[in-house]
Amino acid sequence: MTSRTIAIRLISTLLTFLGVAIVVFVMVRVAPGDPIAMMISPGASQADIAQMRALYGLDKSIMVQFFSWFGAILTGDFGTSISLRESVRSVVLDHIPATLELASLALLIAVCLGASLALVAARYRGSGLEVGIDVFNGLTLSVPDFLWGLLLILLFGVAVPLFEISGRVSPDLELPFVTHFYLVESLVRLRFDLTRDLLGHLLMPALALALPLAAVIAQVLKTSLKEVLHQDYVLLARTRGFSEFHVLLFEALRNAAMPALTVTGVQFTFLIGGTVIVERLFSYEGLGNLAIDAVTNRDLPLIQGIVLLFAVLFVGINLAVDLLAVVLNPRLRNG
């Protein structure tokens, strides 16, 4: 990857961020409803309403509001939440660890499950097992993540109550944490009682998010593996006496993984977006749940901060996938 390509990518990233900022700012202001009217008491005078609008800068023109807000963002100031009366930056930073842990666990489950299904289907290609895996993938893709969440709640939360169906951690547990990355910190502190409880709350929403992504990974990787298995170096490995699973894992998988990696990076951004509904469904205290509360309360500064953070995550993930593709495929470095 040349310096010119890197420069173009960085400029594109900055323009994307600016475009998202403009779209978000305009959209939340043309939407119906007055955030000040929702937070002020019914008997407030016009003077009180005007004072509140001036406090949040809503008395100025749209253009002045945008440049004032965007200029503050460049300094790290995302404003004050209207409904929570707290700094948007602190509120978002308090909730983003929960969403990142949920999305990361979902990605881990999706990659492990999707890769396993693809390897088994490629190993037993042409058999009834491959047909069964294809049917499973099609069924999994046809059901959205929030519906998987409902089914999991009914199955493992009500019929066979194995996991928790709401919240992030049991309220009766002591939480001696410095950060909001509870799962990571519980492992570091060797508090495995907390780890078990956190996983009990995490597994069902993570699985609901992971199943559709696992099906996508399985289909793409299986197709790529079946193409690679006809290459000369794979045939040579077979003639040397290696087993079929050895050929799949150590000869074919590395070269077949690139399309699946690209698709996984793209789909991971949709997975993060899917946390909004799934977190609400499981009453999980993450950024998605916070986003729904912000929209419900017409909390303009909080909505803008959350959407911008999602945009940063999306752009950052896509950039990371591109860089990882360059590392795994040296031929792209001169592209």
Image (spheres, rainbow, N blue to C red):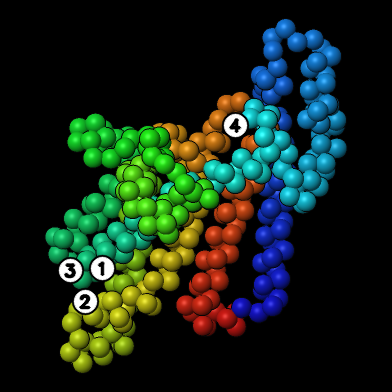
Label for residue 245? 2
SS type, badge 4: helix
Residue that appears at 24% across and 56% down: 134
| Mark 4 or mark 1: whose residue is earlier in sequence | 1
Q: Nearer the viewer, mark 4 or mark 3?
A: 4
- Spatial CA distance of label 2 from label 3 is 10 Å
Q: Is residue 97 left or right of residue 21?
A: left
Quick one: which residue is furthest to the left in this view?
Answer: 128
Q: Which residue is mark 4?
A: 294
Number of dots carrying numbers = 4
| Mark 2 or mark 1: whose residue is earlier in sequence | 1
Type of amino acid under label 1: Leu
Q: How would you rate the neighbour count of disc 1 (Cα within 10 Å): few for under 14, some for 14-19, many for 20 or more?
A: many
Q: Nearer the viewer, mark 1 or mark 3?
A: 1
Q: Which residue is mark 1?
A: 119
| Mark 4 or mark 2: whose residue is earlier in sequence | 2
| Mark 1 or mark 3: whose residue is earlier in sequence | 1
- Spatial CA distance of label 2 from label 1 is 8 Å
Q: Does residue 278 appear in the picture of this structure?
A: no
Q: Is residue 67 above or below residue 320?
A: above
